[in-house]
Structures are given as C-alpha cells and as structure tokens.
Amino acid sequence: MIRAGRTAVDAADLAKLHGITSVVTARKKGLYSDPTLPAPISATRKRLWDRDQAAAHAAGEPIPELPAEDDPDDLLEAQEAAALWEITPKRWLKNVAEDYAPPASAEVYGIPHWTRATVTGYRRPGAGAGAGRPRGARDSRPRARSVRDEQHHKRVRQVQEMVKAAAAEKRELKGPDVAVELGISRAQGRRLLDIALGLQAEGAATHR
C-alpha cells in the first residue's frame, strides 16, 4: 500500500538513491538484504519502498514513520483491494477484467493500484439495498448486469475504432495503449483488444 501523499520507489530507483546505477550491483553490495533497510510497502513480488523512508536510509538519517491511519487516497494493490471485498486476489482481478470491479486508479511501476475510496465506494454487484431491479420492473435481466454489459460493449466499440485508426496509420495497437487511452488496467486493455481483434477477424471472414 502506498499511503496517501507518499510516493514509492522500486529496486532500481532505490539503488539510485544510494548512488548505485545497477540493480545487479546493488544486489551484490547487499543493499536489498540490508537489515536496516525499511520494509517494502508492496504486497507483490515486485518490491516497492516508501520514497521518504528510502531517502532517509540512503542519507543515514532517522527513518520517518508511515502514516498509521487509513486514508481514502491510499493506493492499494490487488491483494489489499481484494481484502476489503473479502475475496481472493485472483477473484478481484477477474472482476476487474470483466467490469465487475473498478478499473485501476493508477499504475505504479507497472503494478495496478486502486484508491481506498474507489474500492470502498464502488457499488458491488448484488450488494446493498436496491442492488436488484426496482419493484415493478419488467426487464428479465438484473439491471446492474445490464448496465455493466452496456459499458462493456461501449468499450469494445471504442477499441474497435482504435484498431481502425491504428491500421490507417500503419502502427500496431497494443493492450497497454488501450489501457492508457481508456483509463483501465493493462489486463483489461489486453482483453478488450483481443475481443476487438476477434470481432474484426470474424467480420473479415463473413465478407469473403
């Protein structure tokens, strides 16, 4: 978790704070195994450190404490976001990919993060009063699902237009490009691109 108002550094930038230009060199020097090094703030295998703490360590100064209280602007990784929903990280990422959970608020060193407010404020499928269809509604499908499907189809159409534009410009469109353009996670961007390309291929086959 990256606390609100704080920034993170990865292994390479941590090494640079110590005047070391290579992660390999830093590892050989024992930087990452130094017992005085502040604990990583990340929950994934890719380790991240709080920049203020890392800078203080590099300067030989007292290590500042991390904020103890939760804040709506805290940036959470998938594991931490999943814990708030009381589901597994795998289920969380699947929900994100299928538009059943909010897209990432930011990517930090390639790791998707969600603000605490985004996670706790998102209306989960089937959760809360009134999550189903209004009384008297005649549509047979759950309304929340219909809205999500509509949003999904809209995004697919957007990506189809992006594919056409990229083809016209003779450039390759990649999942990360889609993610940046639509403000979603890379995994979601790749998935939407695969769907759009699949539909394009089906359309081409139909018109042969």
Image: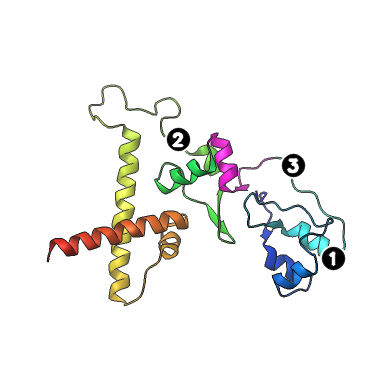
Q: Earlier in the sequence, mark 3 or mark 2?
A: 3
Q: Callout 1: few (<14), some (14-19), or many (20+) C-alpha neighbours within 10 Å? A: few
Residue sitting at x 41%, y 62%: 175
Tell me how many marks there are: 3
Residue that label 1 marks: 59
In this rendering, the answer to whether 52 lies above or below 80 is below
- What residue range appears in magenta? 70-87
Residue flagged by tag 1: what amino acid is it?
A: Ala
Residue that label 2 marks: 124
Residue sitting at x 33%, y 60%: 159
* Residue 188 placement: quadrant: bottom left
> Would residue 189 be found to the left or right of residue 74 on screen?
left
* Residue 51 placement: quadrant: bottom right
Q: Is residue 193 magenta?
A: no
Q: Is residue 82 magenta?
A: yes
Mark-to-mark CA distance, 3 and 2: 27 Å
Give residue 194's position: percent from left, percent from top.
34, 59
Give residue 149's position: percent from left, percent from top.
31, 43
Query: For the view shown, which residue lies furthest in the left direction?
Result: 208
Residue flagged by tag 3: what amino acid is it?
A: Ala
Tell me, yes or no, whether the two marked residues, 1 and 3, touch with CB atoms within 8 Å.
no
Residue sitting at x 62%, y 52%: 44
Q: Earlier in the sequence, mark 1 or mark 2?
A: 1
Residue that label 3 marks: 68
Residue flagged by tag 2: what amino acid is it?
A: Arg
Provide the secondary structure element on which disc 3 rests. Answer: loop
Q: Earlier in the sequence, mark 1 or mark 3?
A: 1
